Image (tube, rainbow, N blue to C red):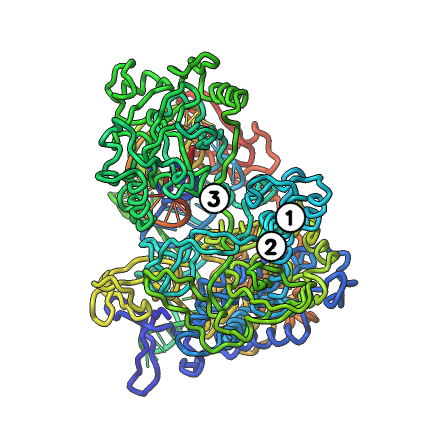
Amino acid sequence: MEVLYQLSYSPEGRPRYQRGSRDLGPVRSPRMSESVRPSSDVPTYRYNAALANEIEAKWQDRWDAAHTFWTPNPTGDLADGFADVADRRKLYVLDMFPYPSGVGLHVGHPLGYIGTDVYARYMRMQGHNVLHSMGYDAFGLPAEQYAVQTGQHPRATTEANIANMRRQLRALGLGHDPRRSVATTDPDYYRWTQWIFLRLHGAWYDDAQDRARPIEELLEELEEGTRAPDSDANPDALAWIDLDAGARRAVVDSYRLAYLDDALVNWCPALGTVLSNEEVTAEGRSDRGNHPVFRRPLTQWMLRITTYADRLLADLDLLDWPESIKLMQRNWIGRSVGAEVAFPVEEHANVDIDVFTTRPDTLFGATYMVLAPEHPLVDVIVPDQWPQDSPFEWRATFGLDKLPPEAVASYREFAAQKSELERQAEGHEKTGVFIGAFAKNPTNGWNVPVFIADYVLMGYGTGAIMAVPAHDQRDFEFANEFDLPVAGVVRPPDEWFAARGLDTDAPASEWPEAYTGDGVGMASSNDDVSLDGLDMAAAKDRIIGWLEEIGAGEAAVTYKLRDWLFSRQRYWGEPFPIVYDTEGVGHALPESMLPVELPDITDFEPLILAEDDGALPEPPLARATDWVYLQLDLGEGLREYRRETNTMPQWAGSCWYYLRYLDPTNGATLVDPGIERYWMGEGRSGGVDLYVGGAEHAVLHLLYARFWHKVLYDLGHVSTPEPFHRLFNQGTITAAAYTDDRGTYVEASQVEERDGSWFHDGVEVIRHDGKMGKSLKNAVAPDDIYRDYGADTLRLYEMFTGPLDASRPWSTQDIVGVHKFLQRFWRNVVDEDSGELHVTDVPADDETRRQLHKTIAKVRDDMAKLEFNTAIAALMELNNRLTRVVQQEGSAPREVVTAMVLMLAPLTPHVAEELWERLGKAGSLAYADFPEPDAGLLVDDTVEVPVQINGKVRGKVTVPADASEADHEAAARADARVAELLAGATVRKVVVVPGRMVNFVVG
RNA sequence: GGGCGAGUGGCGGAAUUGGCAGACGCGCAGGCUUCAGGUGCCUGUGUCCGCAAGGACGUGGGGGUUCAAGUCCCCCCUCGCCCACCA
């Protein structure tokens, strides 16, 4: 931990604490523990760490014993006590659940958990039936890697880590319903993760109805002949009746939302697994271990999230989410509107290159084409010989001394071995090669050469582009590189030419860069259609209309979003409920066979292959041969099967945990429909009322979870189209971190400051600020703060340092401020020496009472908006007044004390409960009514308003709260100083905002 | 390169959305308590000039709108996050 005070010993052997000054360097907090603190002059009943710890343990035990935070469901196993809350409104408050890491929590982790707890407690006191719990996202690579290193089973370490985190979170006094705490690694939980996978596998997307439907309904339609078996798996477009059993199965499989595909994946041979993009570093190496990562095609399970692209985009409008997060999701989905255009390939009748473009208005300017290197059409159209007179430049660098097929192979090899990151490092320098083929621009009949280049990506659009160098910067650069013609078809404005020192009639071949803005069409006409003189929007409409007429293209929409790669070659994840028969055909297991439990194995080591080994990866589960091979009767008699040995990615379990909290013990269904409707079924989109978590999950988790939820919605398993109605991103806690001259982080707690410089072990280090955590070696353990100040102080500190959505630096030094606030409030209520209350039933004076009610109003406002920092500031101000009252009167007015205890209850529940009990109240105040302000006390009889002359404050006057504008002006003129300054000046204008200010404008 | 967000005292941050900039807290200074250190309590604390009264300046920089700008508009600088050859 950070140290602020220096511990030394007096000659008598008593400990001394010296404030850290620049000379003294590192120092240690004075509130280490009672046992080492000089206690002779500390009053017995002072609120300090020791007393706080005592109070906190007492109330945590009581809450547990009394089931204070057990939240009743309307029906089912958890329905006890529902009658008592049936008339309350429901409220579902949710935290993004944590991965149970081995090092436990640091004080940066619980910021959001404290925020939701304060809000949940506040809303409970406002009469809501509040659901708030906490589970564990416990599958994942760290536990598995720890298992490889130590031989300990991941389940053992995971359970130990969960137990430790539960202990740390319990010590914070979070009001969670412990019965609903699930871990994604529980077989009772992942049984339902597998069940959802079966729903995905057993569903297809009906474009006409725009929803997923059970695969049985597809089969029915195919068999009845009401639907044709259109599919890549049916290339000859045969009728259903003409397909054999295997072909029929292939067609149906190709419709499923969960399907097997050959995908290009991040394959890390050293780790023996594929990695998600997030697990690959900026250098193109594995985040863990820094091993090289390669792109390789592997047969993997995929989820067809792309079919939901439009709904995932459109339904963002229903959600109360930060605009920045919505924007990130929109960008990730990446919807582009444009057209698909077919370019006929020369010398190949009936072969077209289909391209997607957002600028069909520039079609007349397409002077060449580019295919992605791995585009399947390349092999079809590449000729054996170079065409006559093909320019030398087009074949450089990869086609020299080679025939076209060799040039293609050569460039493909070059492109495949280049990582994404290497490409970026090269500053998007354009490479590629002519493949010897030509295509025909459908507008003007130009024969345009066809290239392959890695700036065209197979995964986006059609994997092929028409290149319009005059109006696309990338195409422009490529055209320069290969000496290709540049044809301008949109006329830039005159200023554009002027800014580049060009004549306004300079041809595109003389432009220094592409013109990508709007403009008037030119050189864009043929016998049938002309875009000349049209602006961009009109030109797009016109050309799309023409393309559709002649059958050469149509309007089209494309997305950046790709289908979700769903397989991992890992042990510590959910097994797939899939088996393969002896022909290698996959079969879904029936629901009755769930859960498919992970077999116990002892060797978690991934299969390490050489970097260039082309062998197929073998997941650890493949070695559990007793488990892998089995005999089953899946309706065709007892047969041999082999289990799927990949596991699901960590995202799977986090896609639906919020549903299981609702009905965690249900053995018959995922969640009881009535219970689901009760907790999820309100608001525009429905869903969780408040979901709090870090912005780092802006895209992946939140997109995946929305996707699963929509599938469950389409199939009738949940009642709302969206899972999370209101999303709130809490900030991160940062802290000073230090690096030595090698750039390595050093333990921040051991750094000392001297004269504005920092030293570690006597060596000067450089200070940075960064997110608190293990990697920057600047973590502060909550246990240390509990010990030195108590959990209530930690809660209050984290809520006080700023608005919940702002990042803020951790400063152990500042904690003392909120601790002293609690200490002073306690002292205002409890005599520090005797422990007796000094609370009086004599009413508070008018001004104190007014401030009390204004504070109540402000705290209620701020709590509802999650602006806890200003609520706390108002409570501090009220306490400062209370302190003066107690000093003058010798006791505290009960009405103020009671209200303050209730207002503190959500923030610092332990000390609030303790004072509540000492005030003679029975039971927990968790369900007490939050104070209501007396509206009559919120407005003052008189207000002080500033008087300005030419906008500068020159005086202040007090006027009745309901004074008219004229009264304001009169009062202002009556002020001696104002009168003096106005004497002899000409008042040209008087601006009065009643209750706000008066401004004299003088000439 | 593109997108989003943010720049307010020595520090964390307030400011009813155009109306007294700096609430509340930390730190710092002085005082009381104390042999002393610490704790606790009281007072002060944006900068500059002034003994004071008071005055000038002041929300990253420059310009503008307005009786009035931290807040609205334009240009620029810095930092953070996200995406990054997406046709």
Res. A264 visible in picture: yes
**Which residue shows up at 31% across the image and 72% down it?**
A27
Q: Chain of mark 1?
A: A
User: Mark 1 highlights which residue?
Assistant: A937
**Tag 1: amino acid:** Leu
What quarter of the picture does the N terminus of chain A occupy?
A: bottom left
Left or right position of A449 against A354? left
User: Mark 3 highlights which residue?
Assistant: A332
Q: In which quadrant of the rendered view does residue A40 lie?
A: bottom left
Q: Earlier in the sequence, mark 2 or mark 1?
A: 2
Left or right position of A688 against A300? right
**Crowd around label 1: few <14 · some 14–19 · many ≥20 (10 Å):** some
C-alpha separation, residue under disc 3 versus residue under disc 1: 51 Å
Left or right position of A448 against A764? right
**Tag 2: amino acid:** Leu
Q: Are marks 3 and 1 on the same chain?
A: yes
**Which residue shows up at 46% across the image and 73% down it?**
A783
Q: Are marks 2 and 3 on the same chain?
A: yes
Q: Are marks 2 and 1 in contact (CB under 8 Å)?
A: yes
Q: Earlier in the sequence, mark 3 or mark 1?
A: 3
Q: Earlier in the sequence, mark 2 or mark 3?
A: 3
User: Mark 2 highlights which residue?
Assistant: A852
Q: How many marks?
A: 3
Q: Nearer the viewer, residue A837 or A686?
A: A686
State the SS at label 3: helix
Q: Chain of mark 3?
A: A
Residue A810 point in image, percent of width and height: 40, 61
Residue A277 point in image, percent of width and height: 42, 53
Q: Residue furthest bottom?
A: A12
**Tag 3: amino acid:** Trp
Q: Which mark is residue A385?
A: none
Residue A212 point in image, percent of width and height: 65, 46
